[in-house]
Amino acid sequence: MICIAASEVLDEDLDANEKIIVSDMEELETLEALRIFESETFCKISHEILCKCSDEENLHRRTMILFDLLGKYRWGEKVVLVLTSFAASYGEFRLLMQLNSCIPLAISVAMLKQLPTDVSPLKPQFNALSLLVDAMVDVTKCIIKFEKLPLSRVELDNETKAVAKSQIYIAVYWIIRGILKCSSQITDSTALKSDQCSDSTIIATWELVSLAYQLRSIYDHLRQQVEVCHHQTETKLYHKLLNIFKETQVDNQEVLSLLFALRDDFPLKQCSSQAKLGVSDLKSKVVILLISKPELLSIEESLFLVQQTHNHPHNKDVEASYAIVWVPIPVSSTWTNAEKENFEYLSNSLPWYSIRQPWLPNSAVVTFIKEAWYCKSEPVLVVLNSQGTVTNPNAIDMLFIWGARAYPFSASREKELWQEQNWTLHFLIDEIDPLLTKRVEEGRNICIYGSNSIDWIVEFTAKMEIIKRAGVQLEMVYVGKRNSTPHVKDILANVSYKNLSSALPSMKTHFFWLRLDSIRRSKLRLGKPENYTDNVLDEVSALLDIDNNDENWAVIGRGSNSIDIIRLEGPKMMECLDLFPSWGGNLAELGFFGALRHALAPPILPRPCGHDFTHPSKEQGEGVVVCGKCKHPMKKFVMYK
């Protein structure tokens, strides 16, 4: 009964985000808090509650004795502890009143307690007792709601705070006094005889009802005042969050505390070990807030993010310098049971940090996160540097493209990476498949292709076999399609079964296309330069558009840094392969890529066309550049800004 009474009071709050069933962990924490409570003090409280009280003066004196015993506790804790002490006797009395007419055991216990044989005259008193207990519990919840306000972080107006506290002092006094009165009447009822029930019940009922109405009146005033305090706190906290992200901080502790540690000193957990953590564990680190619905990402996106941040070969150098914290936020203001189950399952499976009890963050914090970082239906990865400053409002594409190499994941780092990046075969496949990456790094010729037709794949691979038999070292890899339908999975199985070529496994195929989508989004977000052609954006967009139109395509490339990479598509590709007997004679002189480019190129104009082309950097301008229209070599000039 003690645990039930404590949980009824402690695990409920009028805040919409907290009207949920207490988890097993929270119940254990409540029990642990009760164990910490000194047994000697608890016995003294129980003794005072169970003592018979004969008059109002004695009732006041015993109330003050309990105040002395509870002097070191907060006001909400005082009430909860006294209610807990009272719960056993009240629960027993209530059960006996309800069951003593129908259950033999209850009848026997009632006889031992010397309750009247006919308890029907006590029912008005019992109803009044219930009315008073309900009023006391409601007032207690209101007090707890006030004490849960983040007053250490946000100051209330002095007058507002003073009015609320004075009402709380009065409320606590009358709750404790009411508990003593209830206990006294429960004790008195066991000594009543049937002929005494009538007069005593009327007086007792009137006293209990009077106390209940008095506490209900206190509750109405206190609730209004607490709502004023709550609204004022929410408003001030929201503006404080807005301002703190505009200021330069010494470290990230103040920012993280405002976001997550207003109600809990250990608001985080390490998902893999389930260890409780405070925001101090993230000090001096770059913190990436993964903000999403409780369902997180799709399975493919989640696994890809894990690969890019934890299984990535470049991650070991920087893994101690940053941390990902999952911040799940439901669409509505309350958590459903399904959302809680999703969170519990995923937060126990992922290698990141997460909010330990994501329903606890203040509603002002949730509102700020949604509005300031545009968190709607799609997940975002907000990057905070070691000072708590937002350096990237959404780094999800960066992580999908470069993984840990993008550290410290700032928007400026994203621009820097793109300035260094060329369109190469290595960049196209990244390190999604270690074996394929190794082959690229060894400088082998690789053909990556996609199609929705097994007949075309059979024809295409047969034509490529002719080229390979002519002495060209060429490895082929099927990468499926962006939308992996059952039909595409059947094609993948057929490619492997018939040994037509190598093929990426189904999950890595998802990774390949997710990464291409991220490349295009990132490029479009940064904007296409006006003074030169963005080869990466053009090539990726072409592949995604070709795939979207269910057309056949292939990309042939070589080496990690070589710009020898050619995209083939549609009927023109098959025409070119059919003409291999004609242009294959150029292999010895031009090499495979030179001969293929020559075969794909339009006829060379008789003289240079006069076009110019500006490269964005010196490195991209090295080597011979051929005009895309007339196919003549272009003269190189250096231009200074």
Image (tube, helix red, strand yellow):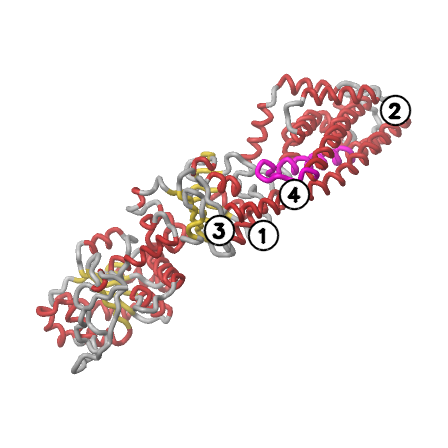
Give me the C-alpha separation between circle 4 and circle 3: 26 Å
Mark 2: amino acid: Ser
Nearer the viewer's eye, disc 4 or disc 3? 4
User: Could you say whether the residue bearing mark 4 is in a helix, strand or loop?
Assistant: helix
Q: Position of residue 329 (x, y in %)?
A: 53, 49
User: Could you say whether the residue bearing mark 3 is in a helix, strand or loop?
Assistant: strand
Badge 4 or badge 1: first in the primary sequence: 4
In this rendering, position of residue 141 left or right of residue 362: right
Quadrant of res 160 = top right
Q: Is residue 138 magenta?
A: yes
Residues drawn in magenta: 131-159
Give me the C-alpha separation between circle 4 and circle 1: 20 Å
Quadrant of res 641 = bottom left
In this rendering, position of residue 132 left or right of residue 153: right
Nearer the viewer's eye, disc 2 or disc 1? 1
Give me the C-alpha separation between circle 2 and circle 1: 56 Å
Q: What's the mark number on residue 139?
A: none
Q: Which residue was labeled with disc 1?
A: 332
Q: What's the mark number on residue 194?
A: 2
Q: Which residue was labeled with disc 3?
A: 292
Quadrant of res 579 = bottom left
Q: Residue at x 29, y 62 (%)?
A: 494
Crowd around label 1: few <14 · some 14–19 · many ≥20 (10 Å): few
Residue 541 seen by the camera: yes
Q: Which residue was labeled with disc 4?
A: 230
Mark 1: amino acid: Ser
Q: Position of residue 423 (x, y in %)?
A: 27, 62
